[in-house]
Image: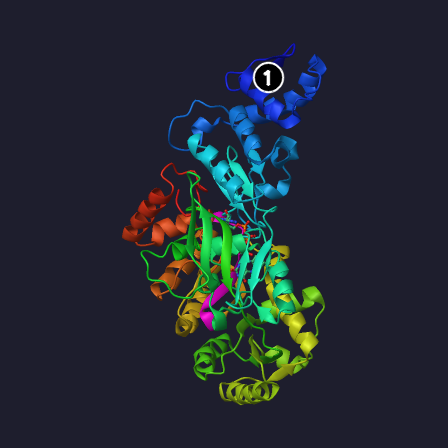
Amino acid sequence: MLEDGRIVSDVFDHTSLLRFLETRFGTKAPNLTNEWWRTTVGDLISTLGQRPTSRSVVRGVDTCGMADVAALLAGAVGAEHVLIGDAIGDDYGHDEALTAVPETPAFVVRPADTAQTAAVLRIADEHRVAVTARGSGTGLSGAAVPRGDGIVVSFERMNEILDIDLHNHVAVVQPGVTLEQLDEVTAAHGLVYPVFPGEYSASLGGNVATNAGGMRAVKYGVTRHQVLGLEAVLAGGDVIRTGGKFVKATTGYDLTQLIIGSEGTLAFVTEAILKLYPRPEHQATVLAPFPALDHVTSAVPAIVAAGTGPLILEYIDQLTMAAITAHVGLDLGVPEDVKRRALAYLVVMMENTHEDRLDEDVQALGEQLFDLGAIDVYVLPARAATQLIEAREKAFWVAKANHADDIVDIVVPRSAIPAFMAKVAELGQTHQSLIAGCGHVGDGNVHLSVFQPDPEQRHKVMRGLFETGMALGGAISGEHGIGKEKRRYFLELEDPVKVALMRRIKTAFDPNGILNPGTIFD
Ligand SMILES: Cc1cc2nc3c(=O)[nH]c(=O)nc-3n(C[C@H](O)[C@H](O)[C@H](O)COP(=O)(O)OP(=O)(O)OC[C@H]3O[C@@H](n4cnc5c(N)ncnc54)[C@H](O)[C@@H]3O)c2cc1C
């Protein structure tokens, strides 16, 4: 609050504010007239004043106010890379989770390198301020939603591909590099980083933090199978390097794997060493309509066992297929009578470096699909195939546009998918909810949209889905993570011994609890 150019606040003292302004404006500080104080500083004060001080953020006692933190952050990354108040765009307050409530952080900082990231975490730790890392904000679990009194560390400026090492077949990337960026560069070398979660604007830092999966996991596994090493900043600002440009190491605990999938709660990733593979030139996509969903799900283990190593093995239910193809105006040329009979589709993409071997595999797959009960089998023209895969990747946007109330990405052993889907149908009926979807059926990861506006009913459906998945030997999330939105279910349903162990690991990495509080744990 301002009175006649004087700051009246028990949180922001004059000296620290002046220090902040000096850092921002340098020696050419503007003439500090009453009017100037009223507008510029008034905005800053009222923005900061609406937020609790850092004292209330996490455990520990600290006497420093937010203006001190602002000054220190400006000193660490440069004042122009500390955003406050109206300068913070809406995007920094949310990810793509359907149910997460957006929250504007107190500060957004944009470090240029590892040293600046370390300086920011040191400041946050000393002053007990919550810090949330942000990649591209495409996450689906609310994990990137910050605290209103915290700092967002956005890795948008750390977006360089540092090395494409052709001898060791690895890429070394900064966390802000997007999948799209990496794919373009690797393609030019005839190589591929094979993890393709459906949103290519996602960052590699975000992929590592969520252990992202995607459609190709049936062949290449998920992010954790493709990361050889990391550089990471710990909560107190120490920098560690884990792993390296090699595939094996038995040298103490595997910290690389511990950090992967930890959703920004253990350390901030500032570099990743990723495996690269030769990019197969030839691909073919087969579409097989089936008369019932359980025929599709039962067919999957047999297809995997045949050994042709499909790159993609997806199921799409009738409703979802109609919605995603209509969304992009895609006509796959499936006759109307087949469409009417088809309650589910299997999409299989194969790849090979040799065209003739690919043809043999596709021929064998087609015969197998008929044997497994497919109504028909179509080898899609290349353009239609690309469009179908893209449409499938956009399934989330279609669900959102159709007002899905929540989504799940439960994973079960692939042989348990028929039993899981039977229970899904039962839960939908019991709680009068529409549950539709598609999924990376080759790796047991089922994506479902739940349409149930009543929160109490929806909770019953969600809990029922998670309980069923776990009872069948599965897990709550195959790839999106727990974040803030699945935390309640995770804490209710997961083995308490494991949760307690995870809490101890969290404390060992982050004793003051500053890293993304509220994510995974409460
Ligand atoms: C249309 C659509 C399709 C999708 N399809 C898939 C899919 O097929 N498979 C899949 O797995 N996911 C999918 N996703 C989810 C999302 O793309 C992934 O979770 C992705 O890994 C998030 O990356 P990001 O850069 O957007 O991370 P963000 O959303 O910014 O952050 C995600 C988490 O990572 C943390 N984080 C970010 N950067 C760092 C860092 N450098 N160090 C430490 N922590 C960090 C954040 O704090 C947060 O906890 C999809 C999303 C959309 C919108």
**Which quarter of the rendering shows the N terminus?**
top right
Q: Give whichever of 1, 129 is nearer the camera.
A: 129
Query: Residue 28: where, in percent of width, then height?
Result: 69, 22
Residue 182 painted magenta: no
Query: Residue 488: where, in percent of width, then height?
Result: 40, 48
Q: Give whichever of 134, 372 is nearer the camera.
A: 134
Query: Residue 34: where, in percent of width, then height?
Result: 69, 13
**Whether residue 135 is situated above or below residue 61 in the rendered picture:** below
**Whether residue 178 is situated above or below residue 332 in the rendered picture:** above
Q: Residue at x 41, y 56 (%)?
A: 256
Q: Which residue position is annotated with label 1?
A: 1
**Which quarter of the rendering shows the C terminus?**
top left
> According to the image, what is the colour scheme of the structure?
rainbow
The residue under label 1 is which amino acid type?
Answer: Met
Q: Which residues are magenta?
A: 442-457
Direction from residue 115 to residue 78 in the image, left or right = right
